[in-house]
Image: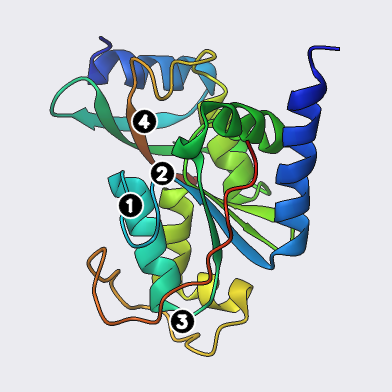
Amino acid sequence: MTDQPENQLRDALQGAIASNDVILFMKGTPEQPMCGFSARTCAALEATETEFAAVDVLADPRIRQELSSLSNWPTIPQLFVHGELVGGADIVGQMYESGELAAVLGAPAATGGNPLPDAAEPGSAPPLQIENRLG
Amino acid sequence: MPTADEVKARIEEGIPGSDAEVTSDDNVHFTARVVANDFANLSLVEQHRLVYAIFGEGELGGSIHALALTTETR
């Protein structure tokens, strides 16, 4: 069957979402985001000092297609916490500023009201990386 | 390429009773703020899905390269 590789990809995506408490699907990597929306989302996560897994959807165009069909969400980035879609860059940014993001993440810095820091600020702890094994 | 006015009209038609403010410098990247009664009792994810659903398959990320979205319940 021709759809078997797609099912495998879907299984791999579902597995990655299920096995990582916090996982971000993004364009590029946290060290080198390839899109402003992905960069902003990483910056918000890093500001909460939460470790997160990151998957670069640019590694394989099928990832994005399968992910969007799985999540019913058309755009990248997509943040999942405990298996649930939290949202894209706009929602994550809004939740960061309200303090809700830190609460959802169970992060210690649940202060809120902070402006979003500039993207790609050096010096913060490097996030956990998982390999792209989704191809 | 859609204009900001066209994107605004599409959103307001797609979510009856909504008000959308849409801006764009280049007719490719858009910023929209949408206020609607229909958003009541919906999560932010569900609110954004309502707006995204207005645009056809491939349109977001295609002719509308980026749509920065804020949703509010009236």
Asked if the residue at tag 1 contacts the one at tag 3, i.e. Cβ–Cβ closer than 8 Å, the answer is no
Which mark is drawn over residue A98? none
The mark nearer the N terminus, 1 or 2, is 2
Which mark is drawn over residue A27? 2
Q: Disc 2 to disc 4, how far (Cα)?
A: 28 Å
Give the residue pinned by disc 4.
B20
Label 2 vs label 3, nearer the camera:
2
Q: From where the camera sits, is residue B37 visible?
A: no
Amino acid of disc 1: Pro
Q: Disc 2 to disc 3, how far (Cα)?
A: 21 Å
Amino acid of disc 4: Ala
Residue at 55 percent across and 32 percent down: it is A64
Amino acid of disc 2: Lys
Same chain? Circles 4 and 1: no
Q: Answer with the quarter of the image where residue A46 lies.
A: bottom left
Asked if the residue at tag 2 contacts the one at tag 1, i.e. Cβ–Cβ closer than 8 Å, the answer is yes
Give the residue pinned by disc 3.
A49
Mark 4 belongs to which subunit? Answer: B
- Residues packed near mark 1 inside 10 Å, few (<14), some (14 to 19) or many (20 plus): some
Q: Position of residue B31 (x, y in %)?
A: 29, 36
